[in-house]
Image (cartoon, rainbow, N blue to C red):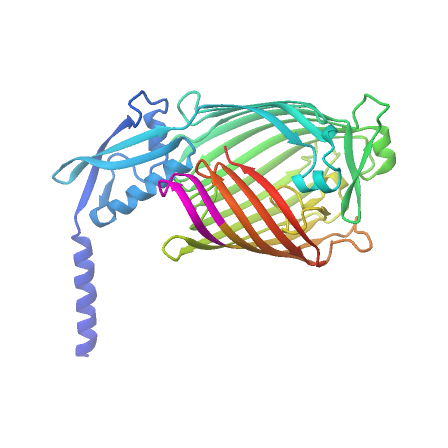
Amino acid sequence: MRFLLFIILLLSLGHQAQAQLPYVRIDSLILSDLQGGKLRTKAKTVAAYLPFSVGDSVRLNNLQEQLDLAQQSLLNSRLFKRVLLRVKEWEGKSIILGIELDENLGIYPIPMLELADRNFNVWWKSFNFDLRRVNLGLWGLWRNPRGYNDMFKLIGQVGYSPKVELVYLMPPLGNKNAWGYSIEGLWSNNKELAYGIADNKRLFYRDLNSKSAQFDRLRFRAGLYFRQDVWSQQQLTLGFHNYGVSDSIFAQNADFLLGKARQRDFRLRYSWSKDRRDFRNYPFKGYYLQAETEKKGLGIFNELNQWTLGGHLGYYHKFGGGYWSVGGQLSGKLSLLRQKQAFFEQEALGFEEELVRGNQYYVIYGQDYLLWRSDINVKLMEWGEAKTPFMALHLRYHLDYGYVWDRFYQQQGSLVNRSLWGTGPAIDLGLMQYRFVLQFEYSLNQSKETAFFFRLKMNL
């Protein structure tokens, strides 16, 4: 009984001591440019990326942690190269915070040389560096034109796949219960199209004697964003799509658009995400959660009826003095409507980042898939400040697993409805706070095939 009373007394004293820990009130923020100029970014925008607001009281023993979180959040906004936070004035229980910022470039006019193929290795091995499969153009990005971390993007492309794309994004302004929006439009015209697959590789059709397109696409989308806090966001997007294929493509694969030469549809997509990663471009610590659902075909044109659920979970743990990290990512897609869908709408693994490394030469179509990707990563060298490195060299080892379920388009010997895996070492070179990452990988896959792979990831 005495022992129980002693425990209760200790707990009550601990709670009382915690309650008596001093707080400090954040009275105001003073922003300045580390280069001595005038900041383009508005004060309201900076405040939107802080985990606290002016007028909030912060427990004194948590103040440094909150300042570190604020610094990382501002760096992840991609607005700044360097961020310094410090207490400028401290009077009683009130403080004035100084935030010194070094802004990134606002305009990125990048001459574009883009491959029509999914990755560099496919262009190299399957098409022998065919320069006819290269797109030339201008990739223009104007970030923060109004000082609100808004973004205007223009892509003009000629060559193998002519394309024009316009995007404007206005993020939520506020760290709690804030709204934002986006609008975009795209037109593209393909002279060659992957109309099917054989041996898990895409089959292409191109008529060299014809100037007409094999595939044309028109797309408009409008999105609404809601930010619950600095880390969490919801998004609702309404889109209109208009696709068309030539008679030649229809003859090669009538199921490409499921018996039609043209498909029009409206799409509604909802997603929720929570991002607590340290470096979003190249995470070493933290976690990422994302869930989404999309309905393709809203009953207006009656040409498409597809409903999917998807999700992504990523977790990263840093150890060894901050030089080592182990991470894993789990993602997947589930089709809720089980009837046959258009071949074009059945992309599963092998597209963009959704792939089992070691299988970059292959594409896999199906209704459902599951993908696990894991890495152990060690930072070998770093140039620049710890949180804003100009250059960093990493050694990495990956182990991936994937599975695609398909009921309609599978072929004998295909990679659907079977386990896929890939493993091997890699070297990553990160540039400009990992805005550009050069990856050199060597992989072994489930078929005992080995190959070197090269990738360039851009995070502008």
Indicate left or right for 330 with 412 as reference: left
Q: Residue furthest left?
A: 92
* Whether residue 342 can be seen here: no
Q: Residue furthest bottom?
A: 1
Residue 48 position, x and y percent, is 36, 33
Q: Main secondary structure of the magenta part?
A: strand
Q: Which span is picked out in magenta?
A: 377-394
Which quarter shows the N terminus? Answer: bottom left
The residue sitting at 22% across, 50% down in the picture is 61
Q: Nearer the viewer, residue 20 or 429?
A: 429
Residue 16 position, x and y percent, is 17, 58
| Residue 400 position by quadrant | bottom right
Residue 378 covered by magenta stretch: yes
Residue 432 covered by magenta stretch: no
The residue sitting at 78% across, 30% down in the picture is 192
| Residue 342 position by quadrant | top right
Residue 203 position, x and y percent, is 80, 40
Indicate left or right for 258 with 138 as reference: right
Q: Nearer the viewer, residue 290 or 324?
A: 324
Q: What count of labels does the image hold? A: 0
Residue 11 position, x and y percent, is 21, 65
The residue sitting at 20% across, 56% down in the picture is 18
Q: Nearer the viewer, residue 234 or 44?
A: 44
